[in-house]
Image (cartoon, rainbow, N blue to C red):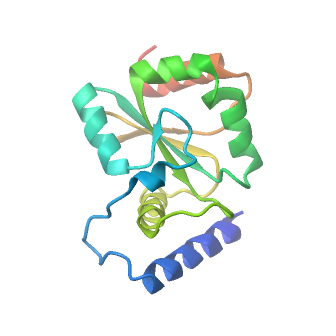
Amino acid sequence: MKSIYKTFLSLASIAAITAGCAQAGEPTTLSDSDQKGVPAGWVTDYDAALKQAKAEGKDVMIDFTGSDWCGWCIKLHDEILDKEAFKEYAKENLVLVYLDYPRGKPQTEALKEQNEKLSEKYGIRGFPTLVILNSDGKKIGQMGYQKGGPKPFVEALEKVTKKS
């Protein structure tokens, strides 16, 4: 898994360089097309999500996923994250960030660049990985797939966010 992920990051880096992406230090600008194919209630713009979390006093949950190839990622969404019980909890408590590393879905260079930088920042080594941040953007926990559906998942999440 690590070698596949490293290969993907290397290819993404080469693609970003050859496409003439933003220079180091320049902000990346995500477009509306970066939301295409993203589950309802999730955003792809990390910086915007942090601002929203700060303004609303919510935690942030970042989903590092391989939506079109990772079986555990698909299972996580099917069994937990796409269920109404989780969506209701998230609406009140979380800003949801969807960072996808697909094999067959197109992405803008800005989105690829953002996602690569964030995978490096948070030391992502496999999928799915859920990184939990507080409203100030500080990492407070990390989770992955958990069987049992939304209820035990939310209970585990509340332990991470200390809201139980």
Q: Nearer the viewer, residue 119 or 74?
A: 74
User: Farthest right residue?
Assistant: 71
Q: What residue occupies the far bottom of the structure in this picture?
A: 18
Q: Where does residue 3 sit, x and y in percent of width and height?
A: 69, 71
Q: In this view, does 95 lie above or below 49?
A: above
Q: In this view, does 118 lie above or below 86?
A: below
**Image quadrant assignment for residue 12:** bottom right
Work out whether residue 137 can be spotted. Answer: no
Q: Nearer the viewer, residue 6 or 112?
A: 112
Image location (x, y in percent) of residue 107: 53, 63
Viewed as shown, does residue 120 lie left or right of 136?
A: right
Residue found at x 52% / y 82% = 14
Q: Nearer the viewer, residue 104 or 78?
A: 104
Rendered view: 107 above or below 135: below
Residue 12 at least partly seen: yes
Q: Residue 150, percent across and down?
A: 64, 21
What's the residue at 69%, 69% (across, down)? 4
State the image quarter where residue 95 is shown.
Answer: top left
In what quadrant of the picture does the N terminus appear?
Answer: bottom right
Q: Judge left or right: residue 22 versus residue 69.
A: left
Q: Is residue 162 left or right of residue 36?
A: left
Which residue is pictured at 38% across the width and 56% down the height?
Answer: 31
The residue that appears at 68% across and 64% down in the rendered structure is: 103
Name above or below for residue 133 compared with residue 150.
Answer: below
Q: Position of residue 105 (x, y in %)?
A: 63, 60
Q: How many labels does the image show?
A: 0
